[in-house]
Structures are given as structure tokens and as C-alpha cells.
């Protein structure tokens, strides 16, 4: 995105259907990740706006069914739905600490294949960039008062293999058909998520 973003989470943190959306995508490095991100996006959309940041572990569904059968059953998962998919599992995170700081303190166990985060932000047009104050609090106030601001919800996901995917929904166009997807829409958030995983380097064993 070429637009400037400011977070709108109330704690000050820096923060068509999923199946149809996935079927329309042709440039994915990992369709299973895209499906998981769109599943999370659909789930959080049902809760409405003005929500805190959320964090999810992405677990290989086949592994979950095999090693945690009771949990898998409780989640409605079985062997037929397990192959080649991820199951998002929401994590408990406090509301006092900004999401960026939370991510800096996390290192996922080997059983977690990837992770995803949900944040709400304000998007300003590029023409506003030169007017944004350097002070964080002043910049937030500037974004909240800007007449051309747009509110956006972002769901970003990363896997240990280095695949990325994002889904964006504007509050002004709050319908499933208007969700925008892409592999690199919020690079800074994707980098923070990737740092919580042991990303496989290209060309390594």
C-alpha cells in the first residue's frame, strides 16, 4: 500500500467468502496460509470494529488431529479436513502492551507452523505524509482528525517457510467482496511476525 497508516486500537497498540477469495488468487506462495488468514479475517469481521489487536498460532491441521485428537474433535476437525491446511488458535494477549512489544517477546514452539495478527489502523492519503508530526501521540491525533482518513482492519500471517499473506478490509466498504488480499501489503508487521518464528533461509537444508 502506498498510503500512510496510523494505528487505531483503543489501547494505543500498533495494530465473497474466504473460499471464493482463495480460488481467485494465482500468485500465492502458500494457499494454505491464505486460507487461514481469510478464515481469521471472516471470524473477526463477525465481531465488528473497534477491537483490540489479536494474535493467532497457526498449527498444521494434520499434526493437530494426530497429536491432539480430543482438541481436534472439539474444534470439529477430522482426518478428511486435515491435509494441507492450518488451524488458527487464538492466543491470550494483554491489552496493556502494544502488539509490537508483545511480538518482540514471543518465540513460538516447534509445533506452531506459523502465526497471524489482527490490527485496526487509520490509513491516510500519501498527500498527508509531509504534514504528519514526528511525535507519536501527535501523529495519532493528526490521523484521527484528518478528514480523508480511512479505517482498515489488517490480518497478516507468516509461516516458518517464509510465506506471507495479508487481508485488508476498509470500514467504509465493510463487506466480504471488498476484502483485499496480497502477500506483502504490510511489510513491517509481516517482519515482526516472522521474527517470532525460525524462518527457513532459502537454499538451506
Image (cartoon, rainbow, N blue to C red):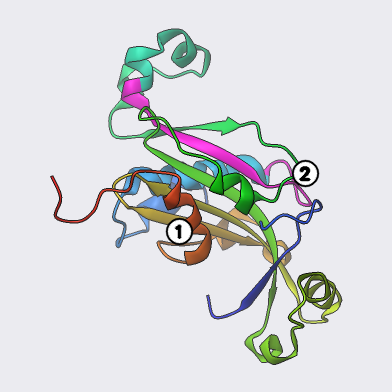
Count the marks.
2
Q: Mark 1 sits on what residue?
A: 191
Of mark 2 and mark 1, the one earlier in the sequence is 2
Q: Which mark is residue 44?
A: none
Give the camera-side residue of 34 and 58: 58
Q: State the residue at coordinates (31%, 49%).
A: 30
Q: State the residue at coordinates (78%, 56%).
A: 12
Asked which secondary structure carries label 1, the reply is helix
Work out whether residue 86 can be spotted: yes
Q: Please indicate whether residue 136 sits to the left or right of residue 60 in the image.
A: right
Give the camera-side residue of 186 and 132: 132
| Image: 64 above or below 135 | above
Q: Position of residue 126 (x, y in %)?
A: 63, 87
Q: Position of residue 129 (x, y in %)?
A: 67, 87
Residue neighbourhood size for the residue with mark 2, other residues' Cα within 10 Å, grouped as few (<14), some (14–19), many (≥20): few
Give residue 138's quadrant in the image. bottom right
Q: Quadrant of the C terminus?
A: top left
The outermost residue toward the top is 70
Work out whether residue 186 can be spotted: no
Q: Which mark is residue 96?
A: 2
Q: State the residue at coordinates (61%, 53%).
A: 100
Give residue 78's quadrant in the image. top left
Q: Position of residue 146 (x, y in %)?
A: 82, 80
Q: Please indicate whether residue 13 sits to the left or right of residue 109 in the image.
A: right
Q: State the residue at coordinates (69%, 63%).
A: 121
Q: CA distance from mark 2 to mark 1?
A: 22 Å
Which residues are drawn in magenta? 46-63
Find out whether residue 173 is within the magenta segment.
no
Amino acid at each position: 500500500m502506498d498510503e500512510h497508516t496510523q494505528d487505531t486500537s483503543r489501547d494505543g497498540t500498533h495494530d465473497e467468502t474466504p473460499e471464493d477469495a482463495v480460488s481467485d488468487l494465482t500468485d500465492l506462495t502458500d494457499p494454505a496460509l491464505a486460507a487461514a488468514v481469510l478464515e481469521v479475517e471472516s471470524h473477526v469481521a463477525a465481531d465488528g470494529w473497534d477491537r483490540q489487536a489479536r494474535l493467532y498460532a497457526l498449527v498444521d491441521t494434520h499434526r493437530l488431529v494426530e497429536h491432539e485428537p480430543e482438541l481436534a474433535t472439539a474444534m470439529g476437525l477430522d482426518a478428511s479436513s486435515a491435509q494441507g491446511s492450518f488451524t488458527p488458535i487464538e492466543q491470550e494477549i494483554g491489552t496493556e502492551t502494544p502488539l509490537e512489544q508483545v511480538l518482540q517477546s514471543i518465540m513460538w514452539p516447534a509445533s506452531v507452523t506459523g502465526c497471524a495478527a489482527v490490527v485496526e489502523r487509520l490509513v491516510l492519503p500519501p498527500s498527508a505524509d509531509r504534514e504528519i508530526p514526528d511525535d507519536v501521540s501527535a501523529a495519532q491525533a493528526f490521523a484521527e482528525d484528518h478528514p480523508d482518513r480511512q479505517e482498515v482492519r489488517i490480518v497478516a500471517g507468516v509461516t516458518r517457510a517464509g510465506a506471507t499473506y495479508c487481508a485488508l478490509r476498509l470500514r467504509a466498504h465493510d463487506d466480504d467482496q471488498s476484502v483485499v488480499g496480497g502477500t506483502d501489503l504490510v511489510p513491517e508487521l509481516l517482519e515482526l511476525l516472522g521474527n517470532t518464528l525460525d524462518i527457513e533461509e532459502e537454499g538451506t537444508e
